[in-house]
Amino acid sequence: MGVSMFTEQPMSILLVEDDEVDQMIVKRSFRDNKVLNPLFCANNGEEALTMLKGDGVEKPDPFPKIILCDLNMPKLGGLELIKEIRSDKDLKNMTIFILTTSNSEKEIAEASLQNVAGYIVKPVTFDSFRDAIKTLNTFWTLCEFPDVNH
Ligand SMILES: [Mg+2]
């Protein structure tokens, strides 16, 4: 479990994904890799923003430092969400990984301008996706994520 140097709380992750099957695949990949970090889920960008800003709802606790973000979603898409996050003084430093299908090259190019940490291609096979989550888990276990605002 990735634990920040600056708090004793486990680092949590926010998954923003409108596809129920893809949400299940991420959850299953966490389980299979014994990733113990708390995983919060939002069904679209609008829901994610409401959660992150605590806009009439309780903020997730521990507050997520990493977002796994789908691009194509109703209401507020991934790119729009990322732009909102980058322009919010309390949220702008969040680490964001994009979950994408291989056919969204234009969105990937645009997202690159928003300082995203990386891309995970959605599963061609479950095994390859599980391996991607395993790699990510190694990344956030090794990295330190200072508490900037939370
Ligand atoms: Mg989608």
Image (cartoon, helix red, strand yellow):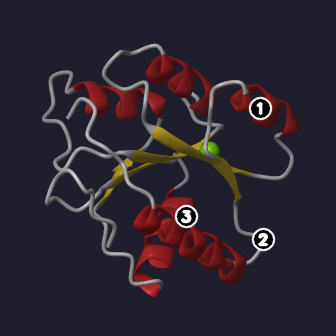
Q: Which residue is mark 3?
A: 21
Tag of residue 107: 1
Rounded to the nearest angstrom, the CA distance separating label 3 from label 2 is 13 Å
Few, some or many C-alpha atoms within 10 Å of disc 3 (few <14, some 14-19, many ≥20)?
few
| SS state under label 3 | helix
**Amino acid type assigned to the residue bearing label 3 in the image:** Val
Discs 1, 2 touching: Cβ within 8 Å: no
**Amino acid type assigned to the residue bearing label 2 in the image:** Val
- Reply above or below: 84 against 77: above
Q: Earlier in the sequence, mark 1 or mark 2?
A: 1
Q: Is residue 134 left or right of residue 140?
A: right
Question: How far from the left and from the top, in percent, is residue 44?
Answer: 47, 36
| SS state under label 2 | loop
Choose mark 3 or mark 2, whichever is in front: 2
For the residue pair 12 and 27, the one nearer the viewer reads as: 12
- The picture quadrant where one finds residue 92 is top left
Q: Is residue 31 left or right of residue 4?
A: right
